[in-house]
């Protein structure tokens, strides 16, 4: 086997380990993002349910204050009614009292309606909080299981060091094509050729001329997939 191919195959073995580690990390990151999205969804639901309760609570406080204001206004107007010196002042007090009573009645009706609504909303908010607590527990356990092993970072750094070291020994022409294929996530960047049948695992039969070029250390790529072709060693081949 020509040294250019042997060096590239050696590099490829290290790169496959790098890619497996990278794939594992990417898979872990993808699962983490999915878990975070699921948790965020339930957090939004719980917050929306809690906000509805808060909004209704604010209305209840407002309407309660309105009722108290109406009571104070009625009491004040009745006092003025007793002290009215003209019919106009007397009628204005009576009309003011009736208006305050009507507003008070509307607010009390609203308070009764809101009271039943708040109970239902509080039940929904409690259910949303319980569901969020359940999901949070599952999320915490799931994320704990996704923790990267302590030696993973060290392994990644060591593989990168080895890769760069072997990379320096590779033929520049072969390396350029190989790394372009890797960057494109090519499934078969290196394609073996059987030395006797001249067949590849993909079903192509490589010509005698191309096989000789490969033996002589020339860069030959598969015209269909652009993968780099190389001849495997026959049994008993000591070359």
Image: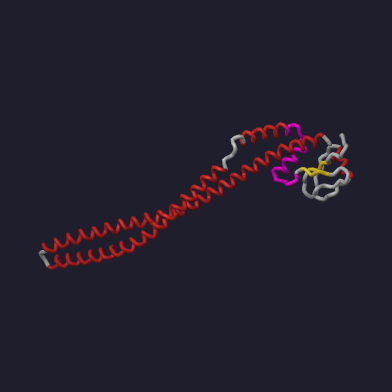
Is 181 covered by the magenta stretch? yes
Q: In this view, does 207 lie to the left or right of 93?
A: right
Residue at figure coordinates x 83%, y 50% from the top left? 204
* The N terminus sits in image quarter: top right
Quadrant of the image occupied by residue 220: top right
In the image: residue 128, left or right of residue 111:
right
Query: Is 84 in front, or is 32?
Result: 32
| Image quadrant where one finds the C terminus | top right
Taking 63 as reference, is 23 left or right? right
Q: How many marks?
A: 0
Q: What are the residue bounds of the magenta stretch?
A: 166-188
Q: Position of residue 230 (x, y in %)?
A: 82, 41
Q: Decide whether residue 30 is among the magenta residues.
A: no
Residue 97, image x, y percentages: 20, 65
Q: Residue at x 71, y 43 (%)?
A: 182
Give left or right: position of 86 versus 137. Answer: left
Instruction: Give the image's coloring scheme.
Output: secondary structure
The residue drawn where x is 87% and y is 36% is 237
Q: Which of 123 and 91 is in front in this view?
A: 123
The x, y position of residue 93, in whole percent, is: 17, 64
Q: Position of residue 235 (x, y in %)?
A: 87, 39
**What secondary structure predominates along the stretch shown in magenta?**
helix
């Amino acid at each position: 086997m020509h040294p250019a191919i042997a060096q590239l195959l050696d590099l490829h073995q290290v790169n496959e380990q790098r890619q497996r580690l990278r794939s594992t990390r990417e898979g872990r990151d993808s699962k983490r993002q999915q878990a975070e999205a699921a948790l965020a969804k339930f957090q939004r639901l719980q917050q929306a349910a809690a906000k509805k309760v808060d909004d209704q609570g604010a209305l209840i406080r407002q309407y309660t204050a309105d009722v108290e204001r109406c009571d104070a206004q009625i009491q004040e107007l009745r006092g003025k009614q007793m002290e009215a010196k003209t019919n106009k002042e007397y009628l204005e007090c009576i009309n003011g009292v009736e208006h305050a009573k009507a507003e008070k009645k509307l607010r009390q009706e609203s308070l009764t309606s809101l009271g039943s609504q708040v109970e239902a909303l509080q039940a929904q908010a409690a259910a949303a909080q319980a569901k969020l607590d359940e999901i949070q527990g599952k999320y915490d356990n799931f994320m704990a299981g996704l923790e990267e092993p302590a030696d993973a970072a060290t392994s990644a750094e060591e593989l990168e060091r080895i890769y760069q070291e072997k990379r320096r020994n590779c033929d520049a022409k072969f390396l350029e094509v190989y790394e372009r294929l890797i960057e494109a996530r090519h499934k078969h960047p290196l394609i073996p050729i059987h030395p006797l049948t001249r067949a590849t695992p993909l079903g192509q039969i490589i010509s005698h001329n191309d096989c000789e070029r490969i033996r002589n250390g020339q860069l030959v790529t598969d015209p269909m997939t652009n993968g780099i072709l190389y001849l495997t060693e026959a049994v008993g081949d000591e070359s």
